[in-house]
Image (spheres, rainbow, N blue to C red):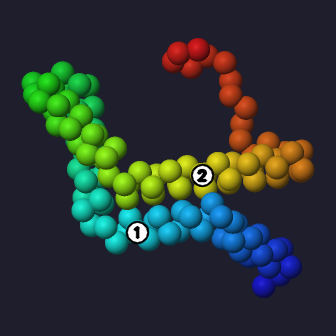
Amino acid sequence: MNNFEQKIKEFSEAIRETKEFQAYDRANRTFQEDKNAQKLLKDFQEAQQTLAIFRQGNFPGQKEQKEKTENLLREVQENKVINEWMQKQRYLQALIGNITTMLSNDLNFPFTLPQQGGGCCG
């Protein structure tokens, strides 16, 4: 292993030692052990995708699918395991985003491209 690879391993270990990573790791293990929470989230995501297909194709049954999706959303929002997992994931993503910004500034090299004007809604 060369020196650069060793430094990357040390950097990864430093991230693993942060409170954000530790909290995410605990929440992720809890989520992975909760088969009901996993099924609920999967069912909700599938309902969302089905609703999108119904809307795109203007298929009948949109109203019923929307109600099903909204009911599943309420269940997901009330599920403490899913909410804890998602919240800790957002905190870890924010940490990684801050690290990326610091690296970008330190190296004077953008890791993400700046947003261009226009787009669908600009």
Q: Residue at x 45, y 57 (%)?
A: 85
Q: Is residue 91 above or below residue 30?
A: above
> Quarter of the image holding residue 35?
bottom left
Quadrant placement of the C terminus: top right
Left or right: residue 105 versus residue 118 is: right
Q: Nearer the viewer, residue 98 or 4?
A: 98
Give percent across and percent down for residue 49: 27, 39
Quadrant placement of the N terminus: bottom right
> Quarter of the image holding residue 17?
bottom right
Give percent across and percent down for residue 2: 83, 81
N-terminal-most mark, 2 or 1: 1
Residue type at mark 2 is Tyr
Left or right: residue 100 versus residue 27 is: right
Residue type at mark 1 is Thr
**Is residue 12 at all visible to an observer of this figure?**
no
- Identify residue for label 2: 91
Instruction: For mark 1, give the secondary structure.
Output: helix
Q: Which mark is residue 57?
A: none
Q: Is residue 116 above or below residue 3?
A: above
Q: Residue at x 66, y 70 (%)?
A: 16
Left or right: residue 29 versus residue 95 is: left
Dot 2 crowding, Cα within 10 Å, few <14, some 14–19, many 20+:
some
Give percent across and percent down for residue 115: 68, 28
Q: Residue at x 90, y 50 (%)?
A: 106
CB of mark 2 within 8 Å of CB of mark 1?
A: no
Q: Is residue 88 above or below residue 115?
A: below
Q: Residue at x 24, y 34 (%)?
A: 70
Q: Nearer the viewer, residue 2 or 46?
A: 46
- Identify residue for label 1: 30
Dot 1 crowding, Cα within 10 Å, few <14, some 14–19, many 20+:
some
Instruction: For mark 2, give the secondary structure.
Output: helix
Separation (CA) of disc 2 from disc 1: 17 Å
